[in-house]
Amino acid sequence: MQHNILRSADERVGFVELFFDLVFVYAITQISHLLLHHFTLLGAVETLLLFLAVWWVWIYTTWVTNRLDPDQTPVRLLLFGLMAAGLFMSMAVPQAFAGRGLVFALAYCGMQIGRTLFVWRAAQGQAVLQRTYLRILVWFLMSAVFWIMGGLADHGARLVFWAIALAIEYTGPAAGYWTPFGGREVSTNWEVRGGHMAERSGLFVIICLGETLLVSGATFSEMDWTLPPTLAFLGAVAGTVGMWWVYFHIGHRRSTHQIEHAADPGRLARLAFTYLPLPIVAGVVLSAVGSELAIAHPDGHSGLPEIVAIVGGVAIFLAGNGFFKWVSAPNFPLSHMIGLGFCAALAAVSPWLVLWQVNALAAVVLFLVAIWESKSWARGAAAEGTA
């Protein structure tokens, strides 16, 4: 490998990585707006598929910058190229299942294959790393066939082809990127800088939380600032703060410590920072849609779509956090179980409430979980200190 582009022991996130993330702020905004304007079962499935693709591009790039130094010119140029392709991918999101499916597919495949080829070429002299990225390349080439076929197909077939493509890609890490000629990859081959991986994962959550605030502010700014929309807006802000508290106060810090001291950080990073963040960020995006609905129609009736967005978003977020924290704790957090129970109760009574009330109560659930968990953590720390 060209050793001058290897990341040093410094695990800080580079400014160019933050610059790269701007494309994904746009991508997440496009996805939430797509779901808002196509809030049906089919629309939700299509949006989920596009969301999984966007996440997969981002997390694979994070794995690369975890190993390569983003402050070196070749790596920077790679990220700039990915940003350009990412903009086309993001711009194509609203019409990905209409007239711009091929644009989305080509941009997506170009990012995944191009980045993989870059690392494979840069890994000359590093047999293990080069073999790893050769296996990854084979899997991306297999999925690219279905991405391109989907981009050329009509609407119904496109959904099927792209679902197959994502199934191939999401199976890859769990299957060790098995190939007939190279066998299976083992996670101990993956050198992981735990602090960097945890920080990058947290930053994607920040991107999604920021998108919630942007959408809420933009929607509220166009409303008459009377009491109901103001209460709905304040509920959206409170809910975003509650999500931040639930994710970052304990779980993120504890998981960061665990991956930094893990015997097999590659295996832990694959689980905790590649797969498990998915329901967390999906819950944030869904809640953003719910907040926009509540602000735009604060006195509106709480129907099934609104309940799914507002309450379902919080429930998915809490469940994702619970499983994420279970990786670094002996049990699924009791506070999160109780929070899920509150979500079920809120969903049951929501048809008798207006939207700003449902939104506010969803925020209350998040704060109750955060406070409960914080006090439980403090009691546990105090008990260990006196033991």
Image: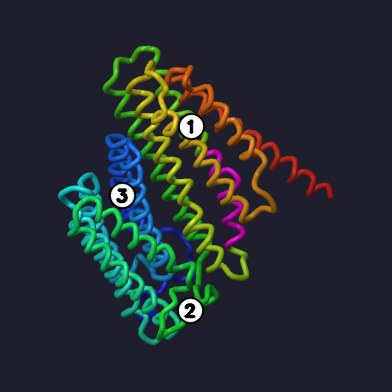
Q: Residue at x 58, y 43 (%)?
A: 249
Tell me: 363 left or right of 385: left
The secondary structure making up most of the magenta span is: helix
Question: Which residue is farthest top?
Answer: 226
Is 224 covered by the magenta stretch? Answer: no
Closer mark to the observer between disc 3 and disc 2:
2
Q: Residue at x 31, y 49 (%)?
A: 22
Q: Residue at x 52, y 24 (%)?
A: 361
Q: Residue at x 35, y 42 (%)?
A: 44
Which residue is disc 3 drawn over?
22
Residue 101, given in percent of the width and then of the height, sits at 20, 54
Q: Quadrant of the N terminus?
A: bottom left
* Local SS, label 3: helix
Where residue 164 sits, quadrant-wise, is bottom left
Question: Which residue is farthest right?
Answer: 387
Which residue is disc 1 drawn over?
311
Which residue is disc 2 drawn over?
184
**Magenta region: which residues?**
244-259
User: Mark 1 or 2 closer to N-term?
Assistant: 2
